[in-house]
Image (cartoon, grey):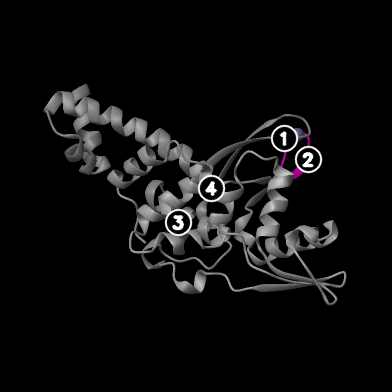
Amino acid sequence: MHALTAAELLAVWENGSALSSPRRALLILGAAAPESPPAELGRLSIGRRDDLLLQLRAAAFGPHLEATATCPHCGEKLEMAFNTDELRSLSPANVGSVVPTRTDVTAPLTLECDDHSLTFRLPDSFDLVEITTGSDLAQAETALLRRCVLSARNGNHVLTPDQLPAPVVTALAARLAEADPQADLSLSLTCPACDHHWAESFDIVNFFWREIEAWSVRLLREVHTLAAAYGWSETEIVALSPARRRLYLEMIAS
Ligand SMILES: [Zn+2]
């Protein structure tokens, strides 16, 4: 896996604009790890996927992140600043050294709850791609959990995932969150106006995607200005380092 170049980021933006969020995540990972088979990247747990995306984001735009949130109690707008390392609960590693391997393909886990015995696996990108079809959130969550059940028994009775009672599904959700903590990033926030505390979830896929979009539009404007002034091709301009592009743009403006 390597840090994305400007040309790769631009291609990701162009190819991903019409895709769903889980497919965009796979597109970004695929561009950064062309050596990894797509099926392998798709089978990474969501926490592992997001951890890699955080590293790729840091490599592309730096580790510093800024976001806004609204206090659910009084409506106060908060500005948050944090960095990618703070969001990574798994062992930190450099982008250069992170190569998804078969060990990332999640091994079956077990759950015993209310006389029910389950084996299950962690959700992956293929699950998210399958369930992101506009159904309501609670239904999608239940569908996701049930996809991850490999076998279920109540005593000697074999159950299908659809037959699991609600408390077992709830226990399963808790076990999944525990087993893949990076999959649900939440920031604990305190409102400066009313002192309300709450957890705000952070979606690295959407966050990174919005940045890639804004960056791509900015880059293409720069390409336009430089191409008009110097007659260079898009490929040549995109291949320039940001520092060189900025200097040439300053020369045109002066
Ligand atoms: Zn507040």
Toward which corner of the image does residue 67 lie, by quadrant?
top right
Q: Tag 1, which secondary structure?
A: loop
First in sequence, mark 3 or 1: give its number. 3
Q: Tag 2, which secondary structure?
A: loop
Q: Are marks 4 and 3 in contact (CB under 8 Å)?
A: no
On the question of residue 135 being in view, the answer is yes
The x, y position of residue 19, in whole percent, is 47, 40
Which residue is disc 2 drawn over? 196
Toward which corner of the image does residue 248 lie, by quadrant?
top left
First in sequence, mark 3 or 2: give its number. 3
Cα–Cα span, label 1 and label 2 = 8 Å
Q: Tag 3, which secondary structure?
A: helix
Measured along the vertical axis of the image, is residue 82 above or below residue 158? above
Q: Which residues are magenta?
A: 190-199
Which residue is disc 1 drawn over? 71
Q: Nearer the viewer, residue 60 or 247?
A: 60
Q: Main secondary structure of the magenta part?
A: loop
How many marks on residues?
Answer: 4
The residue that appears at 36% across and 37% down in the rendered structure is 14
Cα–Cα span, label 4 and label 3 = 11 Å
Which residue is disc 4 drawn over? 204
Report the side of 95 relative to 127 (left or right).
left
Dot label at residue 55: 3
- Amino acid residing under circle 3: Gln
The residue that appears at 79% across and 62% down in the rendered structure is 171
Q: Is ligand 1 closer than 8 angstroms to the Cβ of mark 2? A: yes
- Amino acid residing under circle 1: Cys
Reply yes or no: does residue 138 show up in magenta: no
